[in-house]
Image (cartoon, helix red, strand yellow):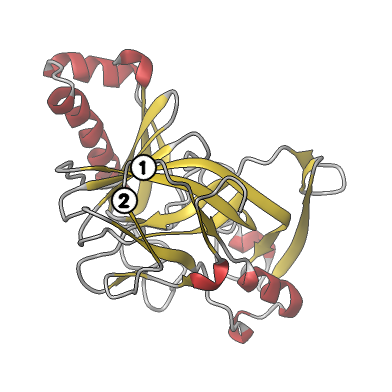
Amino acid sequence: MNGMDHFLGKKLGRPGFRADAEPVLRIHPGTGERIGFETDDAVYRELHDHGDLAALSAPINPVTGPVWIEGARPGDTLAVTIHEIRLKECGWSQSLPGIGALRHRMGDTVASRRIPIDEDGVHLTDRHVVAPRPMIGCIGTAPASGVNSTVMPTTALGGNMDVTEARPGSIVYLPVEVDGALLSIGDIHAIMSEGESSFVAIEAEGIAIVSVDLVPGLSLRAPRIETPDEWVFVGLGDPVQESITRGYEDAFDFLVTTHGWEAMDAFAVMSALVDSALGGPTGSSEPDPLHPFAAIGAVTLHRLPKSVL
């Protein structure tokens, strides 16, 4: 397809990140080859048509892949550059019973709206048409054992982070835990507010076009994102204060260990200029099995302006 060296169709999507999944593509990092990951919105179409979570046949949040990155070894880091996200003709806004920050306001039945997307923008209502801000909700690598969810929780290897900065122009850094890394991508959003109050944002089918580099020996304990203006450190912990602490520690170590700053310089600059916020609502710990869509722990974001480096 135009602008892509490789195209991975949505039929290659499946739930879960796992080391025993057969790679659908093998690439060498650093070549600049562009890979198109097509994502699937079948579950939202089913919910729109039937309004019943129990009647779903499509998987929730399938990810397309995995892609084997030649030379990737445990203890390395992938650097995934997002070049473009191509949206299709519509997205979906859906309220699911018992899920999201507005669950006590939206009632106990599925509410669904098809959101047209065209050259004018994203048609949220008859009166509200906004420019798209497409992003990748779910991106990650495979764990050494078991299966990491593509719904929740977010893990040190990525997953359903729902971070608005995972957008064109950004680089997503993901730890590697298995040979080949096994990169998978899914859950494109046409536009999402910070924190994703509804849990589903404006979900949309599309194609994420990325290239992959490898940073050997860079061992990260959580994902981070580089934008043109900022470094964004993802904090993962339970309770939320632990998540905040870990994200700030990673930003501090980036300044002191990676860039050689004096500790008090880093402390002062971070106190003045590093902002933090809640990330997506997907949590950092396994959800209560009785409430599988209720997050435990928190995803937090900590933004370091590049201008200070």
Asked if residue 126 lies left or right of residue 214, the reply is right
Residue located at (61% from left, 54% from top)? 1
Dot 2 corresponds to which residue?
Answer: 28
Q: Which mark is residue 140?
A: none
| Residue 192 in sight in this render | no
Dot 1 corresponds to which residue?
Answer: 31
Q: Amino acid at mark 1?
A: Thr
| Residue 88 in sight in this render | yes
Asked if residue 141 lies left or right of residue 74, the reply is right
Residue 235 pos. (x, y %): 30, 44
Residue sticking out furthest to the right: 126
* Callout 1 crowding tier (Cα within 10 Å): few <14, some 14–19, many ≥20: few
Q: Quadrant of residue 110?
A: bottom right
Q: Amino acid at mark 2?
A: His
Residue 260 pos. (x, y %): 13, 19
Quadrant the C terminus occupies:
top left
**Count of numbered tags:** 2
Determine whether label 1 and label 2 are within 8 Å by CB.
yes
